[in-house]
Amino acid sequence: MPTFRENPYSAFNFIVALGGRQGDGSEGAIIGGFSDVSGLGTDVNYSEYRNGNEKFNTVRKIPNTHKVDDVTLKRGVVGSDDLWKWLRGVRDGTAEPRNVTITLLDEARNSVATWTLRKAQPKKWAGPTLAAKGGGEVAMEELHLVHEGLEYE
């Protein structure tokens, strides 16, 4: 459960647990840490409705379905093909939905908030941009996830 405090938490201290064969989210079970997580969001759709005898000449907004945004994870290439294997399995017909948790940590590395992606599956994998011009950039890979629900604790 999130804990209220006057100063906002920093966004640089978090753990991503991919569930399944990736482990339960303990630090030692994660193969390579992620440097970026983006796309945590949800959007509620509304239907408009108005009775003919309404007192006010405006429509009511009635909530109905909602949709969730795709989530993007980025990490440096660490010599592990775990993300690629997960995507390849889905691509080849073996659906393997996982509950993915993203845990925000405070300065003392205590959990302060957790987002859970229910039944997440890989949608897209993007490999690093390679350039021989002598830059000092890190080779990065990214994984785009679709999911069926977002929970916040």
Image (cartoon, rainbow, N blue to C red):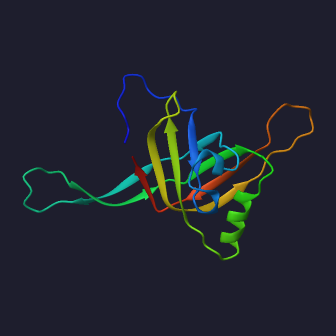
Q: Residue at left 81%, top 45%?
A: 129
Q: Quadrant of the N terminus?
A: top left
Count of all numbered marks drawn on residues in the image: 0
Q: Residue at x 58, y 32 (%)?
A: 12
Q: Residue at x 64, y 75 (%)?
A: 94
Front-lying residue, 60 or 124: 124
Residue 73 in percent (x, y) is at 63, 48
Dividing the picture into quadrants, the one containing residue 87 is: bottom right
Q: Residue furthest bottom?
A: 93
Residue 74: x, y in percent? 67, 45
Q: Position of residue 123 (x, y in %)?
A: 63, 61
Asked which quadrant contains residue 113, the reply is: top left
The answer to whether 118 is drawn above or below residue 131 in the figure is below
Residue at the image position 60 percent from the left and 49 percent from the top: 72
- Residue 37 appears in which quarter of the rendering? top right
Depth check: 104 or 11 in front? 104
Picture layout, residue 109 above or below residue 119: above
- Judge by depth and name the residue closer to the eye, 101 or 37: 101
59 on left or right of 112: left
Q: In the drawing, does residue 1 fall left or right of residue 21?
A: left
